[in-house]
Amino acid sequence: MSGRYKKLEYWDSRYEEEERLLTGGHEWFGAYRDFAHLVRRELRPRTAGLVLGCGTSSLSAELYNEGVRPLVSIDYSPVCIKEMAQRNANVPDMSWMVMDARHLQFPDGTFDLVIEKGTLDAMMVDERDPWRVTQDTITLVDQVLSEVSRVLSPNGCFMSITFSPPHFRSRHYAQPQYGWSVSCDSYGRDFHYFFYAMHKGGQLTSSDLERGRSLHNSHMDLEHLPTLLESDDEDFLNNIQI
């Protein structure tokens, strides 16, 4: 059942149901206030921003209120984008576009900030062994990250919010071709989530590079895998094992 999170039909159906029930949608990985201090640390005046896989989250509105303008939010669900565009029809410098994160339709260096919250997790949902990621998933994630790197300004920042800890997720981010550094913070109380910040023009450390190389190794030394300390009210967390 977890594979449904990669299917457009699932998300279209979900957003249609949310609209029918007049619900605001589920906030993956906590509310904005839980990680706002980490976002604010990275913001600069006159920041042009892009939200990948925006869904019906309030994240775009929160970033707009922080002064991230112009702000573009994309999702590959037409149902989602139609709903969010209608909700924010009279908001200047905020736009909504149907788009595939693997093929961003923007010129190089367009954005000072690119952010995703749970979008990559949904793309990686079929993986069952977090130490041995399939080549298909490695390629998929690389397509997204290559596009993110391309549209970032020379000193831009890519933020990624996930429940995947550094020994699993940093391997994907710590690839030299993206031209950025990698840092990670955690937030949350009973269940911890992870906030990654990739700074364009920054340097990867030797440990980052080693971790990045490990992504392409077919065999790795197994470590104890993290476990969920308590159940989440969204089965998305229990189905993904990244």
Image (cartoon, rainbow, N blue to C red):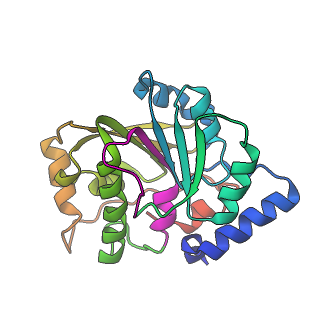
Based on the displayed image, in which of its 4 quarters is residue 12 positioned? Answer: bottom right
| Residue at x 34%, y 48% (from the top left corner) | 151
Is 148 magenta? The answer is no
Where residue 70 sits: x, y (%)? 52, 35
| Residue at x 62%, y 27% (from the top left corner) | 65
Based on the displayed image, in which of its 4 quarters is residue 188 positioned? Answer: top right
Near-viewer residue (119 or 93): 93
User: Is 177 placed above or below 123 here?
Assistant: above
Where residue 136 sits: x, y (%)? 34, 76
Near-viewer residue (118 or 187): 118
| Residue at x 68%, y 35% (from the top left corner) | 91
User: Is 62 placed above or below 172 here?
Assistant: above
Say which quadrant the N terminus sits in. bottom right
Near-viewer residue (46 or 32): 46
Q: Is residue 149 left or right of residue 227?
A: left
Identify the magenta region: 103-125
| Residue at x 48%, y 64% (from the top left corner) | 100
Residue farthest along the top direction in this orientation? 45
